[in-house]
Amino acid sequence: MKQSEIIKQLTDEELKKNLIFSQLLFALIAVLLSFFLFDHILDWQLYFKWNLSDIIYYGTLPGLIIVVIDFILMRALPESAFDDGGINERIFRNQSVSTIFLLTLIIAISEELLFRGVIQTSFGYLFASLLFAVVHVRYLRKPVLFLSVVFISLYIGYIFIITENLIVTITIHFVVDFLLGLYIRFKK
């Protein structure tokens, strides 16, 4: 059975639970892989720096710019170019702002731990960025969505190269997902 058919059979609540489960699985995989791929488990400390200027300059501002670019593309291109089969709509449309905040924070933390914190540090920038894009499998048949995810992943990976700070990449990821989640929730 295709992924889209399975997803259609799930209720919105089951879809949300599956999202949370998959994100917790990503975080667990990141921690488990770090035991094998890091010299020491405390190597995680190297990638968490509370540098407020970097968080704002490399995290928040680029996240806002990405969202503005997304809004411009949404106005310029047909709605069908951004249709992921209704999954994001089903996940975010009936959620409270606090739930959207928590969901997107969980997503940002777990995916950045795995893709930047473990995979990029162990296997390189391009591999991590492309794997991140491929994991978003529902976008593979949607060229605009797929290219957008590839670009954002390459950009976030590049920012990690510059800052070596997961708090910055988590911030970019969170800002993008949270604002787009709010857009889905409140659009008419």
Image: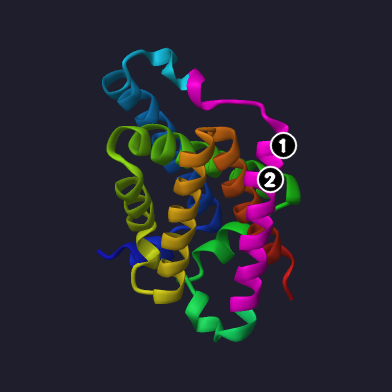
Image quadrant for the C terminus?
bottom right
Is residue 94 among what the camera can see? no
Asked if residue 47 can be seen in this view, the reply is yes
Residue drawn at (59%, 39%) of the image = 168
Q: Quadrant of the N terminus?
A: bottom left
Q: Which residues are magenta?
A: 45-73
For residue 53, the mark is 1
Label 2 CA crowd tier, 10 Å (few <14, some 14–19, many 20+): few
Foreground: 64 or 145? Answer: 64
173 lies left or right of 50: left
Q: Kindly check if marks 2 and 1 are in contact, taking CB atoms under 8 A apart as contact.
A: yes
Q: Is residue 13 magenta?
A: no
Q: Secondary structure at mark 1?
A: helix
Up/down of 27 relative to 134, above or below: above
Pinpoint residue 18: horizontal percent, then vertical percent.
Answer: 45, 47
User: In the figure, residue 116 lies in which quadrant?
Assistant: top left
Q: Main secondary structure of the magenta part?
A: helix
Three-letter amino acid code at disc 1? Ser
Pick whichever, 82 or 38, lies toward us.
38
What amino acid type should be assigned to the residue bearing mark 2?
Answer: Tyr
Picture disc at residue 57: 2
The crowd level at tag 1 (other Cα within 10 Å; few <14, some 14-19, many 20+) is: few
Coordinates of residue 3 in the picture (x, y in percent): 32, 62
The answer to whether residue 166 is above or below residue 181 is: above
